[in-house]
């Protein structure tokens, strides 16, 4: 007999700031739909947990993105994120509803909150994951839905698949942009339930004195659908690389080497210590393909790379690789694109 | 003011080779270093001690006996002493279990401020700091980039988040987690090394002193387990073309047109 009879459903923590919901939450809801669909015999629901003040009207948006149900905790103490009150409220929701699993975006907020909740519940938390599957064989044998959660470690050099066999809920933080966003359906209906936490104290232990906007990036490479990536091998032809991007309606991004050499700003850096991107097209120009760079872009739908070294690592993660010199290929590419448009 | 800095010994490189037969990590020959975020935390603590010599700085780690070397380096940089938490029952601890052990040791040693690194470069979870704070039932401030002021009962820091920076004040005692870019750690100092030779400044704690329930730590007490590990697999074979420059440009443009990335 299954050990976790009372535990069911996949909960997704819905992260919001000033009522704007973080896209990763919807990516997780989309993925949770696939997970529950893989084990229809369990009859699991996808449940969003939305914490904040005056956020109830956002519940329908969460449902439109694929949730069957939304648990709303609306409280003045939850207006802005605080580790203390969010951990208190979320732990109580989990204790009251007993989800089989609980997913959170691996954002700065998610990675501040989830460990605290997991420790309070004494349950396993898999960090910064990039893949989730239900172990279907195990489900058949035991009647338990066990998640195989895969994550990069050692700076993306080693992957581990982590399981939490003996505790519920199974918790994980999941990296943004690794799962596809399903289309929204505004006609979708679902249940909205309000939850009232009981506070042991309403006295905050941490005060945010001031919030300073970081100097705004002129571009947001994570939102671009087409990226042309510059590596050290394209530093001498950045102008024409920009032209390729312009012709395609795309944006220029780069490796850390290019940032270090002072050619482009840090907010254009892709990779482990830069941004994670998932455009429909990534053209890698003069990029060697170091794991730290690839970790931030290898989920792109189509990767085309140009490198003069036939052995370059970047070719291993590309859909198409071209051996060649960027400085001569890129000007020709601008013309070829113009010609293709005119056809 | 007593500051305990949590340090983890990590391999100097995250380049991993795996034994093809056994699947085990090959760590031979890779030197061990102090996790970079932790070194920044130690430097921040030592800067507070520079300003106020009454400050006591303790470096603490849980690990194998050889991790004492790292603590000695911390003392050589200027920490007052090191605490090594080592016991067979602790082997195989995940972050949930690690935080139980560290919290027990911290309670025994005493503290006003605990500084952990944001993230270790090997395990990469960034969970131990917040989980230790939870076990101690004290507040946490993550992603700390600068310590601005420390008072009797509070600390004010700057947090660096994705789009914003926050100035935050937390009640003491609390846990902060630090980022490696926040400062430049100092070198070890000769006279400190000499002191180390005269006096053993590393205290070793085992479970006999801490009395942690062995069921809650180590492999047994860890709710997560690693089912498999693998290095990056090269899935779909790439097609690599060596063509003339013009042919290359034309073929890329043609592909983009076929995929409807180039429209009108
Ligand atoms: C902890 C850590 C974190 C890191 N984080 C990141 C990160 O977030 N993002 C990141 O990008 N890197 C990161 N790095 C650095 C990473 O390891 C690589 O050093 C970096 O990505 C290399 O950049 P590159 O490919 O532009 O340069 P290089 O490695 O110098 O490669 C240049 C490439 O261009 C090719 N080339 C040269 N000339 C031409 C030409 N005319 N035409 C065509 N090809 C040419 C060469 O064959 C070569 O393959 C990190 C490293 C560490 C240790
Ligand atoms: C492939 C693989 C995947 C893993 N995945 C997970 C997972 O998803 N979830 C999970 O719970 N565990 C996981 N573990 C176990 C985890 O790596 C260990 O528990 C590890 O010792 C602590 O986690 P960390 O390295 O991620 O530390 P982090 O949480 O990243 O470290 C943050 C800070 O905590 C302090 N700290 C951490 N460890 C110690 C220590 N031993 N002594 C003193 N201070 C310390 C340091 O200040 C450090 O900078 C995994 C292990 C492997 C091998």
Image (spheres, rainbow, N blue to C red):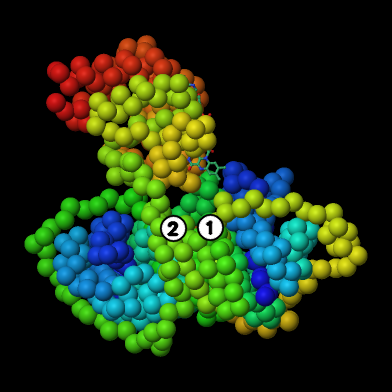
Q: Residues within 10 Å of mark 2 (few under 14, many from 20)?
A: some
Does the beta carbon of the residue at mark 1 sit less than 8 Å from ligand 2?
A: no
Q: Between residues B87 and A155, which one lies in front from this camera angle?
A: A155
Q: Between residues A197 and B161, which one lies in front from this camera angle?
A: B161
Query: In which chain is the residue bearing label 2?
Result: B
Label 2 secondary element: strand
The tag on residue B145 is 1
The tag on residue B126 is none
* Farthest left residue in view: A187
The tag on residue B165 is 2
Residue A145 image position (x, y, % from top left): 35, 68
Residue A310 image position (x, y, % from top left): 48, 22
Residue A103 image position (x, y, % from top left): 35, 65
Q: CA distance from mark 1 to mark 2?
A: 9 Å
Q: Residue drawn at (63%, 60%), measured in percent from left and top?
A: B44
Q: Earlier in the sequence, mark 1 or mark 2?
A: 1
Whether residue A274 is situated above or below residue B207 in the rendered picture: above
Whether residues under marks 1 and 2 lie with C-beta atoms below 8 angstroms apart, the answer is yes
Q: Is residue A145 visible?
A: no
Q: Residue drawn at (68%, 74%), measured in percent from left and top?
A: B2
Left or right of B206 in this view: A155: left
């Amino acid at each position: 007999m299954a050990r976790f009879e009372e535990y069911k459903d996949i909960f997704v923590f819905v992260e919001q700031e000033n009522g704007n919901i973080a896209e990763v939450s919807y990516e997780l809801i989309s993925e949770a739909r696939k997970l529950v669909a893989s084990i229809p015999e369990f009859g699991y629901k996808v449940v969003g947990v939305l914490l904040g003040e005056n956020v109830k009207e956002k519940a329908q948006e969460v449902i439109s993105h694929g949730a069957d149900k939304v648990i709303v905790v609306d409280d003045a103490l939850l207006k802005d994120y605080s580790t203390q009150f969010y951990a208190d409220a979320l732990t109580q929701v989990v204790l009251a509803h007993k989800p089989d699993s609980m997913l959170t975006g691996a954002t700065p907020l998610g990675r501040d909150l989830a460990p605290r909740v997991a420790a309070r519940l004494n349950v396993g938390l898999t960090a910064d994951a990039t893949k989730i599957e239900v172990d279907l064989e195990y489900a058949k044998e035991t009647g338990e839905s066990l998640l195989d959660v895969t994550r990069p470690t050692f700076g993306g050099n080693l992957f581990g698949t982590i399981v939490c066999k003996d505790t519920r809920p199974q918790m994980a933080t999941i990296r943004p942009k690794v799962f596809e966003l399903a289309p929204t359906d505004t006609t979708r209906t679902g249940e909205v339930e309000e939850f009232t936490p009981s506070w042991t104290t309403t006295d905050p232990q941490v005060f945010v004195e001031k919030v300073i906007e970081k100097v705004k990036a002129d571009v947001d490479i994570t939102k671009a659908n087409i990226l042309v990536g510059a590596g050290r091998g394209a530093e001498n032809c950045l102008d024409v690389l920009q032209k390729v991007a312009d012709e395609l309606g795309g944006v220029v991004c780069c490796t850390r080497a290019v940032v270090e050499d002072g050619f482009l700003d840090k907010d254009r850096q892709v990779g482990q210590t830069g941004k994670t991107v998932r455009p429909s097209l990534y053209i890698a120009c003069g990029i060697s393909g170091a794991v730290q760079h690839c970790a931030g872009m290898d989920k792109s739908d189509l990767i085309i790379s140009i490198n003069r070294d036939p052995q370059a690592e970047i070719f291993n993660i590309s859909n198409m690789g071209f051996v060649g010199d960027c400085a001569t290929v890129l000007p020709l590419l601008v013309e070829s694109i113009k010609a293709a448009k005119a056809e | 003011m007593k500051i305990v800095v949590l340090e983890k010994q990590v391999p100097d490189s995250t380049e991993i080779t795996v034994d093809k037969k056994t699947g085990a990590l090959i760590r031979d020959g890779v030197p061990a270093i102090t996790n970079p975020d932790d070194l920044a935390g130690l430097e921040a603590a030592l800067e507070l001690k520079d300003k106020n010599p009454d400050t006591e700085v303790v470096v603490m780690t849980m690990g194998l006996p050889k991790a004492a070397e790292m603590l000695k380096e911390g003392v050589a940089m200027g920490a007052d002493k090191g605490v090594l938490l080592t016991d067979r029952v602790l082997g195989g601890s995940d972050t949930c279990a690690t935080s139980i052990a560290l919290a027990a040791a911290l309670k025994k040693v005493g503290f006003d401020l605990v500084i952990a690194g944001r993230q270790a470069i090997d395990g990469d979870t960034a969970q131990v700091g917040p989980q230790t704070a939870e076990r101690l039932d004290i507040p946490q401030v993550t992603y700390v980039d600068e310590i601005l002021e420390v008072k009797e009962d509070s600390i004010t820091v700057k947090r660096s988040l994705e789009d914003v920076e926050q100035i935050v004040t937390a009640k003491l005692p609390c846990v902060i987690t630090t980022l490696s870019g926040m400062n430049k750690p100092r070198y070890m100092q000769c006279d400190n090394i000499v002191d180390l030779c005269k006096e053993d400044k590393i205290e070793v704690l085992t479970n006999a002193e801490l009395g942690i329930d062995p069921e809650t730590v180590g492999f047994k007490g860890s709710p997560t387990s690693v089912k498999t590990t693998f290095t990056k697999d090269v899935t779909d074979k790439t097609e690599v073309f060596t063509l003339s420059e013009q042919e290359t440009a034309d073929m890329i443009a043609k592909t983009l047109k076929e995929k409807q990335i180039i429209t009108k």
